[in-house]
Amino acid sequence: MRIAVAGATGNIGKLTVAALERDGHDVVRVSRSLGVDLMTGEGLDKALDGVEAVVDAISSTATDRDESVAYFGTTTGNLLAAEERAGVRHHVLLSIIGIHRVEGNAHYAGKREQERLVSAGSVPWTIVPVAQFHDFAETVAGWTEQDGVATIAPLLIQPIAPADVADVLAEIATGEPQGRYTDVAGPEPQDLVDMARRTLAARGRTVKLVPTWSGLFGTAMAGDVLLPGEGARIAPTTFDEWLAAQR
Ligand SMILES: NC(=O)c1ccc[n+]([C@@H]2O[C@H](COP(=O)([O-])OP(=O)(O)OC[C@H]3O[C@@H](n4cnc5c(N)ncnc54)[C@H](OP(=O)(O)O)[C@@H]3O)[C@@H](O)[C@H]2O)c1
């Protein structure tokens, strides 16, 4: 099957490409560095020629709400329009658990816009709400790290291995559209500060972590809001197993 992966050079995108190719599929890689820009539409029609399914795993670096909504809105709109022209039969969106329960997070506002456009669009779809990835804590600490100190919110999450996310997306993309998919998470709940501390230690790095709800993640993200709902699909790889493989 011919499948396009948007965000093919990214964390999840490149693993999804690998999972699909491992299973014998013909994969079209889409990203700006590969000459296809979902923001402008450049190269998109050519890339989707003969494609049956598309996985959208692009991301945005916007920290402003309007910018994030505009970025995800424009890229999703351009991608869906090109899919219609190409006769694509299945659009798979990588989304995030809990985005409809949390106001005030710019990235989540953009992801809600993606979900809105996909579910209102005419290309049959599957939206896959996924938990934070095992490498998320290290990424978040990196956003504020300066002179050996980083701030980080003690989010309660049930993180998942990036390779497990890719396997789920590859499986879904090669099947029939399912509408809103069940939440997909890892096997155990974790605290983001503890995850960051252990990941940095595994990397041999000394960074002082300051827990706070006054940074990018406020108290709207506290409690159980980011945890998977009932009947979630639980992926196999624990945070400890993933961490051991990083050494
Ligand atoms: N981090 C988490 O814990 C988590 C959890 C659940 C869901 N998610 C979602 O997972 C998605 C993927 O995250 P990630 O960490 O894998 O992202 P990432 O590593 O930052 O990769 C983003 C990819 O998108 C491409 N891209 C960005 N803008 C583009 C554009 N205009 N046109 C074409 N390609 C574009 C980038 O390539 P170029 O720069 O070459 O264009 C890159 O390949 C995000 O939407 C995020 O919301 C994240």
Image: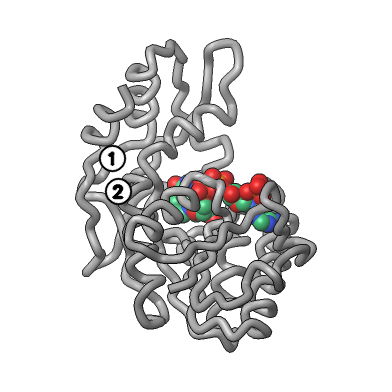
Seen at 39% across and 45% down, the residue is 133
Residue 149 screen position, x and y as percent: 53, 16
As shown in the figure, which amino acid type bears the numbered disc 1?
Answer: Gln
Count how many numbered circles sit on residues in the image. 2
**Distance from Cα at disc 1 to Cα at disc 2:** 6 Å
Residue on which disc 2 sits: 158
Closest to the observer, 202 or 194: 202
Residue 157 screen position, x and y as percent: 34, 46
Task: Pick the quarter of the image with the C terminus.
Answer: top left
Left or right? Give the position of 45 relative to 126. right
Mark 1, other Cα within 10 Å: few <14 / some 14–19 / many ≥20: some
Left or right? Give the position of 169 relative to 125. left
Let me know if residue 219 appears in the view: no
Left or right? Give the position of 66 relative to 182. right
Determine which quarter of the picture holds residue 216: top right
As shown in the figure, which amino acid type bears the numbered disc 2?
Answer: Gln
Residue that extends furthest to the bottom in the rendered view of this protein: 122
Residue 237 screen position, x and y as percent: 23, 45
Determine which quarter of the picture holds residue 241: top left
Seen at 74% across and 55% down, the residue is 67
Residue on which disc 1 sits: 190
Which label sits on residue 56? none
Left or right? Give the position of 167 relative to 135. left
Which coloring applies here? one colour
Task: Pick the quarter of the image with the N terminus.
Answer: bottom left
CB of mark 1 within 8 Å of CB of mark 2? Answer: yes
Residue 175 screen position, x and y as percent: 35, 77
Q: Please tell me whether residue 75 is drawn above or below residue 34 in the rendered image.
A: below
Seen at 70% across and 70% down, the residue is 46
Mark 1: which secondary structure?
A: strand
